[in-house]
Amino acid sequence: MTRMRIPNSRALPPAIFLTFAIFTTNLALQAKDPPPDVCALLPVGQLAKVLGQPFGPPAKTTAPAAAQDHVTGTDCIYQTGAGLPRKLLFRIYLDPSPAVAKDTLNQLSAYFGPNTTVTGNWDNAYLDARHAIHVQKGKVRYYLDIDPIGTDTAKAEKQLKALATQVAAQL
């Protein structure tokens, strides 16, 4: 009969500590708060690269709260500098917790349907009936909408997903 070796009990506390440290560090790296200037998450150069035309700097305003007891957000409104006149709205909210952000995104989805789920480097996202993208990552929710969308909606959706992915990578 073979004997089972019992590990050194002195090694157990450091192993538990390391496991906890690795786990909590990993959680902290999953999502972080946006920078003070949230419009910086979507630089004009990236818009030009992804959308294929130049945009001017964003006009920054306060976005309305989704409901009376919800937070207000920030609207970053970009206008084309040349070519086809277009506007891109980047709306972003910092909710009190990931659970609140997820609940709010889910509640609002009923107003924008029918929706199509979009996978990516975020927690939840969908394209709405107008082809805008709504994203939740951690306690951050954001929305990207191009007006006019144009006749090639599949291309516009792909472009919006690319922009949403770039924003999510910074959170």
Image (cartoon, grey):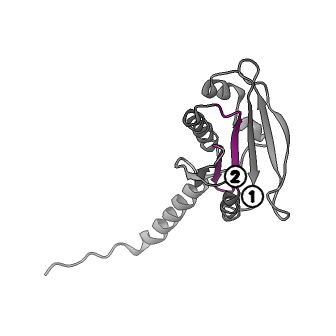
Q: Do the residues labelled 2 and 1 touch (CB within 8 Å)?
A: yes
Residue neighbourhood size for the residue with mark 2, other residues' Cα within 10 Å, grouped as few (<14), some (14–19), many (≥20): many
Separation of residues labelled 2 and 1 (CA atoms): 7 Å
Q: Is residue 76 left or right of residue 48?
A: right
Q: Is residue 29 visible?
A: no
Which residue is at a point 57% across and 61% down the rendered structure image?
A: 24
Residue lying furthest left in this view? 1
57 horizontally vs 104: left or right: right
Q: Position of residue 60 (x, y in %)?
A: 84, 37
Mark 2 = which residue? 141
First of labels 2, 1 by sequence position:
1
Secondary structure under badge 1? loop
- Name the residue type under label 1: Asp
Residue 95 is labelled as: 1
Is residue 104 within the magenta segment? no
Task: Quadrant for the N terminus, please.
Answer: bottom left
Is the magenta region chiefly helix, strand or loop? strand
Highlighted magenta segment, given as a residue range: 131-150
Farthest residue to the front: give it.
151
Examine the image and state in which quarter residue 51 appears: top right
Q: Which amino acid does label 2 sit on?
A: Arg
For mark 1, does the 10 Å Cα neighbourhood hold few (<14), some (14 to 19), or many (20 or more) residues?
some
Residue 52 vs 10, above or below: the answer is: above
